[in-house]
């Protein structure tokens, strides 16, 4: 699964948009010196300092590359971006290195001979590595590029920039980051994914036909969000059978409240989704209200939204984020929609159906793969599912790609879902009364804070506008 040890950062809040269920757990912090950031889709991991802000992305970089991640270290002085591409068939690794070296010299504005290199201690299944350093004395800016060749000629390029540092400290920091980089990919992974995807298409047809009945759905199901033994929020899930535009299908509504550690913020999210039983009509929307309360300042609320609509073989994606470059203005994108695509409305139901129907299906201890849309990345990613049997107990396992961290859907003897767990985080089934007992007063408190803050801002604006 793609859920890493949680922390209160930009990374954790963006993780909330992920399709897999345990992504909603990323709001609470677990203190540790480092955390292992794993990208299961692209098969890499990297050790980063705790409270590093990480954003998963999926956008073009250059002529043939794809940018898959960005990060900012806690001190705010070090930033990085990770790009992946395939080594051209007629290129050697050395040729690729020289191309990167030339581009680095141009970007930094120094002669190529001033760029130094070293062999980094990269871990895992790689065929070649090199770390380049370029120092901008005028701006005390240390630039570095880590270049790693994967087992099937995947090129991973990690760009790192540290400002207000001297060369020795910059090299030390970059070397540490490079030493925490690991290639998880193995040769012939593409073949393994193709096999799992073929099984996934057949499995999807098996669980959709015939369509689920009313008794298969959750009218209203509550879960506590847990970090260790402490709850820090809750999720409520509502599923129903609906008819829209004369087409029958599955409707989903979820609501989530999360509270940051230390009492300095909260977040509310509401999602709605609908998909027809033939999976061709599909729509999903999310609205997130993040309440922040900086020290000695009034609380304020930041709202973002995300909407996807399937049009034939494409997804129309519209996003709005007031903290982004477009300052809240909608951004539209088109994403191809493959045959094996699994809609957002099925994200809670599918693992339950795999548990119920999987015993009769062709899923003998292996993994199946389905393609889903990742709201965080604004692009597609692979989700994999399997079953695990431990005596009388059955679980459904889910993870991102071949190497994402696994989350286990654990069912009780009455076949109800009791818990979804991954490492230090979990969703634990509860009821409405317990969720409201634990968090009702906090929700009321934060709503009052935002209302008072909005009133203060309005009064200040009125005073400013007065003659």
Image (cartoon, grey):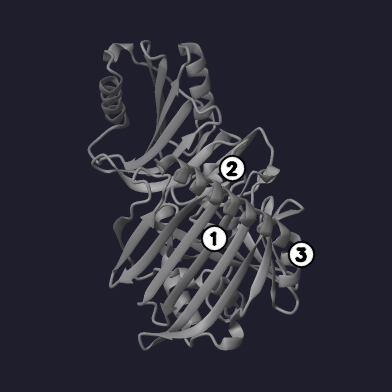
The residue at the point 47 percent across, 85 percent down is 242
**What's the distance in space between the residues labelled 3 and 2, CA to CA?**
26 Å
The residue at the point 48 percent across, 27 percent down is 78
Residue toward you, 329 or 198: 329
Q: Where is residue 206 in the image (x, y as percent from the top left)?
A: 48, 81
Q: Which callout, 3 or 2, points at the residue further toward the start of the chain?
A: 2
**What's the distance in space between the residues labelled 1 and 3, CA to CA?**
19 Å
Q: Position of residue 198 (x, y in %)?
A: 41, 69
Q: Where is residue 109 in the image (x, y as percent from the top left)?
A: 27, 17
3 vs 2, front mark = 2
Circle 3: element type: helix
Dot 2 crowding, Cα within 10 Å, few <14, some 14–19, many 20+: some
Circle 1: element type: strand
Identify the residue position indicated by label 2 in the image: 298
**What's the distance in space between the residues labelled 1 and 2, CA to CA?**
21 Å
Identify the residue position indicated by label 3 in the image: 437
Identify the residue position indicated by label 1 in the image: 269
Q: Where is residue 332 in the image (x, y as percent from the top left)?
A: 30, 57
Dot 3 crowding, Cα within 10 Å, few <14, some 14–19, many 20+: few
């Amino acid at each position: 699964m793609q859920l890493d040890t949680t922390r209160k950062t930009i990374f954790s809040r963006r993780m909330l948009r992920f399709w897999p269920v345990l992504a909603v757990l990323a709001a609470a912090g677990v203190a540790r010196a480092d955390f292992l950031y794993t990208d299961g889709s692209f098969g890499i991991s990297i050790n980063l300092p705790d409270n590093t802000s990480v954003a998963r992305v999926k956008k073009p970089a250059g002529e043939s590359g794809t940018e898959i991640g960005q990060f900012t270290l806690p001190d705010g002085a070090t930033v990085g971006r990770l790009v992946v591409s395939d080594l051209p068939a007629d290129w050697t690794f050395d040729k690729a290195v020289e191309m990167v070296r030339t581009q680095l010299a141009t970007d930094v504005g120094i002669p190529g001979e001033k760029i130094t290199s070293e062999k980094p201690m990269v871990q895992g299944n790689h065929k070649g590595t090199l770390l380049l350093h370029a120092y901008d004395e005028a701006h005390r800016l240390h630039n570095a590029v880590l270049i790693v060749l994967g087992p099937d000629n995947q090129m991973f390029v990690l760009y790192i920039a540290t400002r207000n540092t001297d060369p020795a400290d910059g090299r030390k920091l970059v070397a540490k980051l490079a030493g925490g980089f690991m290639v998880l990919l193995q040769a012939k992974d593409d073949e393994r994914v193709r096999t799992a995807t073929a099984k996934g298409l057949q499995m999807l047809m098996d669980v959709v036909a015939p369509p689920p009945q009313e008794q298969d759905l959750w009218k209203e199901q509550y879960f506590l969000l847990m970090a260790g033994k402490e709850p820090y929020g809750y999720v409520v899930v509502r599923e129903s059978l609906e008819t829209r535009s004369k087409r029958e299908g599955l409707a989903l509504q979820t609501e989530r409240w999360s509270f940051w550690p230390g009492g300095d913020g909260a977040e509310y999210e509401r999602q709605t989704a609908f998909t027809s039983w033939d999976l061709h009509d599909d729509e999903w929307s999310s609205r997130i209200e993040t309440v922040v309360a900086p020290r000695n300042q009034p609380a304020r609320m930041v709202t973002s939204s995300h909407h996807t609509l399937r049009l034939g073989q494409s997804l129309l994606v519209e996003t709005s984020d007031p903290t982004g470059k477009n300052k809240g203005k909608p951004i539209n994108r088109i994403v191809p929609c493959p045959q094996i695509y699994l809609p957002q409305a099925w994200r809670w139901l599918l693992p339950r159906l795999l548990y119920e129907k999987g015993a009769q299906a062709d899923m003998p201890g292996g993994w199946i793969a389905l393609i889903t849309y990742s709201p965080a990345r604004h692009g597609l990613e692979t989700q994999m599912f399997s079953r695990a049997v431990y005596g009388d107990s059955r679980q459904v396992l889910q993870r991102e790609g071949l190497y994402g961290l696994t989350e286990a859907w654990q069912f009780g003897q009455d076949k109800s879902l009791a818990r979804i767990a991954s490492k230090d985080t979990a969703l634990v089934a509860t009821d409405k009364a317990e969720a409201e007992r634990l968090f009702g007063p906090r929700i009321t408190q934060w709503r009052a804070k935002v209302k008072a803050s909005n009133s203060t801002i309005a009064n200040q604006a009125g005073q400013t506008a007065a003659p």
